[in-house]
Amino acid sequence: MTTAVSILPEQQLAALNAAYRQAVSRRRLRLLWGTAIFAAALLLAAIGAEVNLRTLFTYFGNFVSYFDRILTLESGQRVWTDVGEWFWGWRKWLNMLAETLLISYVGTLIGATFAFALNFLAAENTSPAPWLRFVVRRLLEFARTVPGIVFALVFVIAFGLGPVAGVLAIAIHSTGALGKLFSEIVENADMKPVEGIRSTGASWLACMRFAIVPQVTAGYASYALLRFEINVREASVMGFVGAGGIGQELVVAIRKFYYSDVSAILLTIIVTVFVIDIATGWLRGHLFGKEART
């Protein structure tokens, strides 16, 4: 039994090769034009933002020297040569770090609660009325658009220094961010159970309770854990404006030029955030599957 092998004529092979080379040339040309346009847009943006590379390179040494100072004790030795001296205030810092974690936890819990209450009104497929959806969406946009540290500063002015300002700021910002994420989960939910429950004469609230909530609970919890990770970092920064937590001690160390204290507090915050990120990531993956870890 013989197998027939079709051989293209040389002219057809040459035409195919030419077409292939032209296609490759066109792709390279598009890539070149895209790179040029991106570079031009980046340059224009830098000029518009008054980014001066000369200033960056001129004062880059100051940036490096600051890190050299925060890694040096008053005795002139490196911080890791005397850990006891480096972390002399660890008890105080851990107490303030615990306050930061509590601020993050309470603020996240309040924000998630309000987001849960409002997201059904913001979702396109579950909102009772278009005007209500418009109002709730604008409210959530306002809550997540204003930076959390701005809210914290306003609440510090209103209620004074302390964790109350931090909790309120994180709660508001978390409401806006989680409300948006929760509503997107609801918009991707299967509406057939809703139609089935509605056909029995159930109210809107009952439809949400028995048809939507069981579908979206896992996604809600995953996003809430992720938001808690973010809020731990946010709470650390909010201490700069007096909203409680370890950030207050960090800004004092920076302003008074306690260089080794700055590095010690920063390392404490970084390690804590690492541990929380790993723990919550494992928890999301363990409870809701591997896809929830991303």
Image (tube, grey):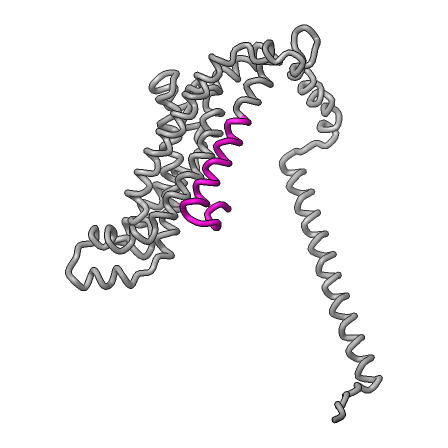
Q: Split into 4 quadrants, where in the image is the N terminus?
A: bottom right
Image location of residue 145, percent across then percent down: 43, 38
Residue drawn 33% across and 60% down?
190
Q: Which of 172 and 70 lies nearest the eye of the viewer?
A: 70
Image location of residue 191, percent across then percent down: 30, 61
Q: Is residue 294 above or below residue 240?
A: below
Image location of residue 54, percent across then percent down: 75, 29
Q: Is residue 291 above or below residue 11?
A: above
Examine the rendering and report whether any part of residue 258 can be seen.
no
Residue drawn 69% across and 42% down?
43
Residue drawn 51% across and 27% down?
272
Residue 18 covered by magenta stretch? no
Q: Residue furthest left?
A: 201
Secondary structure mostly taken by the magenta-highlighted segment of the chain: helix
Q: In the rendered image, which quarter is residue 110 located in?
A: top left
Examine the rendering and report whether any part of residue 220 can be seen.
yes
Q: Is residue 37 left or right of residue 211?
A: right
Image location of residue 37, percent across then percent down: 69, 52
Q: Residue furthest bottom?
A: 1
Which segment did they paint magenta?
270-294
Q: Is residue 211 above or below residue 24?
A: above
